[in-house]
Image (cartoon, rainbow, N blue to C red):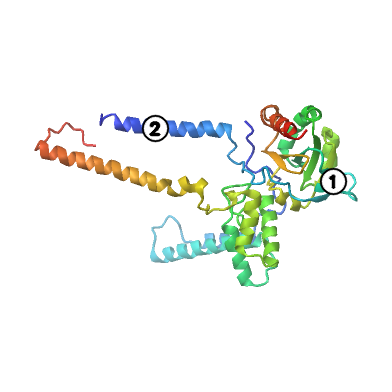
């Protein structure tokens, strides 16, 4: 038995490290859980990207659920996410709001002209001040906000087909079932 | 797997260039160091100490040059430095807000500075950040049910280890008293 002890200890360590590797392939180690989940979205008032004279506030968007998608032209992974948004956006059943984060408006417009515009509405936060209230710390990030203005789901990193099918669509379905 | 790069932002446009005035000064000192192949004499030891001290302060000057802020006085600057060293950058999680060059870290530093000017306390500023970025921004995690394992886990491991050691000692002592000298089988671990 005593001879087996080191081996058992070794196997326990192998198990522990194996679990660590397995866990990290399934979880983004850089994703921070948002404390805002199931809480009212912060108030905001931001100019529209294409008509900067007009602003959009939280109150303007109440009454209909929407997906707030934080993106920027400098963000490489937004380019990965973009085709998924273009393909899946119309079938999601919620308004798609583009939140242009810390971007020069001209760059954002160029980027959208090149890749296409999947958004129903575009707002711009060039200084990035409002994004702090949302707990945004990079792009892309996506918030599902219901008709009452409550954050129901958040995804950090690009929305992939897998994330849309396994997380976003079920979250939308659960939200619509509760308050159609 | 939706893994993304730890720093998914543009490179900071105003990141400090490496060719700072300080580095030139460092080169001068490098050239003044006596032949490095020679065995260390007390004089060269002293030079080395001076060299290290200079390098250290070059780093300090460099860190403060990143972003001069209009502090009211030196005390406020010290408070700002102290606070930003206690907070973690949400983007590059192994860096403090004070050290990180990520754009979000700069935005948060500016926000902290603004809140300080408004007379907010350190605690209020931390609460503000925790409400948005969760306990992740704190290097010192709060004691609450979710972090009990984090705080008391090491104690549990220590108790477990002590138990194992005590059991082993007791068994060995008992073995000694029963059989005077158990034949050594070379198994001495």
Q: Chain of mark 1?
A: A
* Residue annotated with mark 1: A60
Decide: few, some or many residues near mark 2? Use Cα within 10 Å; few <14, some 14-19, many ≥20. few
* Residue annotated with mark 2: A12
* Residue B22 quadrant: bottom right
Q: Quadrant of the N terminus of chain B?
A: top right
In this rendering, the answer to whether B98 lies above or below A117 is below
Measured as percent of width and height from the top left, residue B92 is found at 61, 47
Element under disc 1: helix
Q: Quadrant of the C terminus of chain B?
A: top left
* Residue A158 quadrant: top right
Element under disc 2: helix
Q: Is residue B25 visible?
A: no
Residue A31 as seen in the image, left or right of residue A142: left
- Of B116 and A165, nearer the camera is A165
In this rendering, the answer to whether A22 lies above or below B62 is above
- Residue at mark 1 shares a chain with residue at mark 2: yes
- Of A12 and B171, nearer the camera is B171
Measured as percent of width and height from the top left, residue A22 is found at 52, 30
* Residue A29 quadrant: top right
Measured as percent of width and height from the top left, residue B47 is found at 46, 65
- Of A174 and B183, nearer the camera is A174
């Amino acid at each position: 038995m005593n001879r087996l002890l080191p081996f058992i200890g070794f196997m326990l360590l192998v198990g522990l490290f194996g679990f660590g590797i397995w866990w990290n392939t399934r979880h983004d180690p850089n994703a921070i859980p948002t404390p805002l989940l199931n809480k009212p979205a912060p108030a905001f008032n931001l100019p529209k990207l294409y008509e900067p004279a007009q602003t959009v506030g939280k109150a303007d968007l109440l009454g209909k659920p929407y997906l707030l998608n934080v993106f920027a032209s400098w963000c490489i992974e937004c380019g990965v996410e973009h085709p998924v948004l273009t393909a899946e956006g119309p079938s999601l059943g919620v308004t798609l709001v583009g939140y242009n984060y810390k971007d020069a408006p001209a760059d954002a417009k160029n980027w959208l002209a090149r890749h296409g515009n999947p958004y129903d509405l575009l707002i711009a936060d060039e200084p990035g001040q409002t994004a702090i209230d949302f707990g945004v710390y990079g792009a892309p990030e996506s918030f599902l906000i219901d008709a009452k203005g409550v954050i129901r789901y958040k995804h950090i990193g690009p929305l992939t087909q897998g994330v849309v099918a396994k997380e976003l669509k079920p979250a939308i379905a659960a939200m619509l079932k509760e308050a159609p | 797997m939706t893994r993304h790069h730890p720093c998914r932002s543009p490179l900071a446009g105003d990141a400090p260039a490496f060719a700072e005035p300080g580095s030139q000064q460092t080169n001068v000192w490098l050239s003044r160091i006596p032949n490095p192949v020679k065995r260390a004499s007390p004089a060269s030891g002293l030079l080395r100490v001076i060299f290290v001290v200079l390098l250290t302060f070059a780093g300090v000057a460099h860190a403060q040059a990143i972003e001069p802020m209009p502090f009211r006085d030196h005390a406020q600057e010290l408070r700002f430095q102290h606070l930003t060293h206690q907070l973690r950058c949400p983007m590059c999680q192994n860096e403090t807000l004070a050290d990180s060059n990520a754009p979000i870290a700069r935005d948060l530093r500016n926000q902290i500075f603004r809140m300080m000017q408004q007379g907010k306390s350190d605690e209020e500023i931390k609460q503000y950040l925790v409400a948005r970025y969760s306990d992740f921004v704190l290097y010192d995690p709060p004691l609450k049910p979710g972090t009990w394992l984090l705080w008391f886990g090491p104690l549990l491991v220590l108790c477990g280890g002590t138990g194992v050691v005590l059991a082993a000692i007791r068994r060995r002592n008992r073995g000694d008293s029963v059989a005077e000298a158990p034949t050594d089988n070379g198994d001495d671990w």
